[in-house]
Image (tube, rainbow, N blue to C red):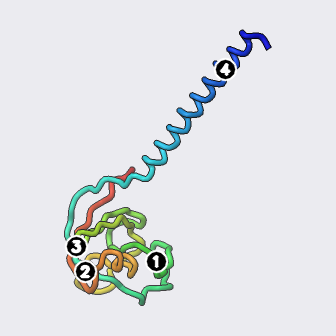
Amino acid sequence: MSGSLAQRLVVLAGIALLAAAVSYAAVERSREDTGALPEATGSYVALAGSSGQAAFGRRTLCGQVIRPATLGVAHPVLPCGARIYVSYRGKHVLTQVIDRGPYAPGRQFELTAALARQLGLTGVRRITWSYAAAG
């Protein structure tokens, strides 16, 4: 192999290595971006409670079956799939509307048992909620 050809191969290999490094960095950055949480919009106060284990196995009006690990809320007006943040005593959870309701008087939201447990909410309590900005 002549010196000129060897130099070209080394330069091409260097360019290929640089291109691979740039591609890897771009993929890693896009993975980080997709993991970012959406911005919260607004801040509202509402009364919320949980239907508890009585809801397990029931199909919601949004088409889901409630299981012990299902995170979500029931709300009479917000559309199915609307993503919201629910906050209680310093804990914040991004969740979504999975049903209509609530099914008990005196509350604006019905939380699944798993969501209530994650927030530490028992009984009917005042929560703060906000919309999760579309992203």
Q: From the viewer's perspective, is the residue at label 4 or at label 3 nearer?
A: 4
Mark before the other along the chain sequence, 3 or 2: 3
Residue 3 visible in the displayed image? yes
Task: Specify the label residue 79 is tagged with.
Answer: none
Task: Give the Cα distance between marks 1 and 3.
Answer: 21 Å
54 horizontally vs 88: left or right: right
> Mark 4 and mark 2: span between their CA atoms?
70 Å
| Image quarter of residue 121 | bottom left
Q: Is residue 128 left or right of residue 29?
A: left
The answer, for residue 101, to whether it is visible in the render is no
Residue 32 in picture, x, y percent from top left: 44, 48
Secondary structure of residue under mark 3: loop
Q: Quadrant of residue 117?
A: bottom left
Q: Going 52% across and 41% down the picture, which residue do you hit? A: 27
Q: Which residue is mark 4?
A: 10
Residue 116 in the figure: left or right of residue 31? left
Q: Badge 2 local density, few (<14 within 10 Å), some, or many (20+)?
A: some
Relative vertical location of residue 113 with respect to residue 93 in this rendering, above or below: below
* Residue bearing mark 3: 89
| Tag 2 residue | 107
Contact (Cβ within 8 Å) of mark 1 with mark 4: no
Distance (Cα) linking label 4 and label 3: 61 Å
In the picture, the disc for residue 69 is: 1
| Mark found first going from the N terminus, 1 or 3 | 1
- Which quadrant holds the N terminus? top right
Contact (CB < 8 A) between labels 4 and 3? no
Instruction: State which tag comes first along the sequence, 4 or 2.
Output: 4
First along the sequence among labels 1 and 2: 1
Q: Residue at x 33, y 67 (%)?
A: 93
Near mark 4 (Cα within 10 A), the count class, few <14, some 14-19 or many ≥20, is few
Q: Along the horizontal axis of the image, is 103 left or right of 16?
A: left
